[in-house]
Image (tube, rainbow, N blue to C red):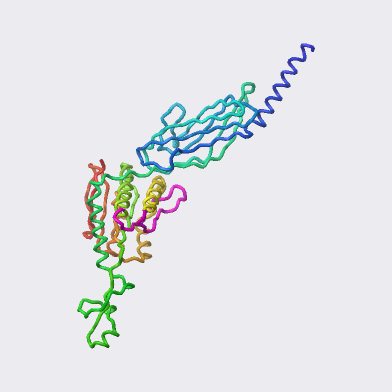
Amino acid sequence: MPIILIPIILFLLYQVERWVFGRYWERNLEVELKFDKNAVVEGEKASLTEVVTNRNFIPLHILQVNFQTDTGLVFEDETNSSITDRVNVIDVFSLRFYSRITRRLPMACPRRGYYSILQTSLNASDFFSPDIHYALRKQRTSLYVYPRLIPFAKIEPLLQQLCGQAVTRRILYEDNFTFRGIREYVPTDPMGNINWKATARTGQVKVNIHDYTASPEVTLVLNVEPPRILFETELLEDSIRICMSLAEGLIREGVPVSLLTNGKDKVTGETVMLSSGASGDHITSFLRALARIDLSKETEDMSGLMEHFLKREENERTTYCFISTSRRDSAELAAGSICDKKGGLLWICPLTRDMESEAPGDKRIDFRVFIHE
């Protein structure tokens, strides 16, 4: 073979290799990311597992796997991760043909939230070409980081007060659909309770006796409006923790609990609401709903939301608890609307030690300050 043909053959081989690699490198290349747990409580640890599978005849000497998630997860190996407005993770693999590599990335979960990874980007190159090739792989993995519960000793007095109010409201309201008997009329009885047939038969005014409703209810109203321009963001997190702690305690006592908040769902963008319930599954619903509140989104006006909700309320026996670190006009108007409907309200207000703890002017409000530790 003439020597002059060698460079030509090498050049042709190089072009063929370059074409084959560029065309087939990502064929049967799979990348799967998966959190090892579905949910943890803030402060706990978890891990993310990467599985890269190359079912291809082409080896991948340098494969770069990139993905992003929201800030709030702290990967222990900081050499491959960086934080901007999101957490960016870059991992480098070297795969032979028909091989698989599994890698585990431990991480801490210091912040409540809902973390998802929906896409992975891949960068690959070979030894013989400076070209860099790109591809995307869809992912579907997520992790709930639930709000931690407030120590029971700190939340117990508030919980007992709410349970007491709920029971009292149960006594004040009778269930018109449960008939217990008939008794003589007294001046304080409403005219609607008079049993006219029994009155005509006996010649004395008789009234119906109804049983009390079997189950009082509590609605937790969570206001996540910032209290002022510059504030400690942990106060809003404290509000969420208090809300979850009260919900968990009430459900353990068998009291149905619902949630109304002006916070927006991170996934749907809608205002977060939960109907009443008292099951173990309802605790999980509360945890997930509160984990998905996105404090970076603009909140809905609390007073308008509360007024609209009270107009549609069907259960007069509901007790309300207002949790708000903000004492802006919108918060006080919302609290006033509840007082107008219910006659009073328990307001729990998380504050730092250096913040003023002045209560709202409405005397119907039982204002309780919760100091952030």
Q: Position of residue 357 (x, y in %)?
A: 22, 48
> So how many labels did they put on this image?
0
The quarter of the picture where residue 70 lies is top left
Q: Is residue 21 above or below residue 290?
A: above
Q: Toward the viewer: 60 or 85?
A: 60
Going by the picture, which residue comes out furthest to the left?
A: 187
Q: Residue at x 24, y 82 (%)?
A: 206
Q: Quadrant of residue 194?
A: bottom left
- How far from the left and from the top, in percent, is residue 187? 20, 79
* Residue 272 inside the magenta-drawn segment: yes
Residue 337 visible? The answer is: no
The quarter in which the N terminus is drawn is: top right
Relative to the observer, which residue lies in front, 351 or 48? 48
What range is drawn magenta here?
252-279
On screen, residue 45 above or below 275: above
In the image, residue 256 lies in the stretch drawn in magenta: yes
Where residue 28 sits, quadrant-wise, is top right
The x and y percentages for residue 226 are 34, 47
Residue, far right: 1
Q: Is residue 59 visible?
A: yes
Task: Point out residue 252 in the picture as x, y percentages from the top left corner.
Answer: 30, 53
14 left or right of 123 in image: right
Quarter occupied by the C terminus: top left
- Asked if 177 appears above or below 232 in the picture, the reply is below
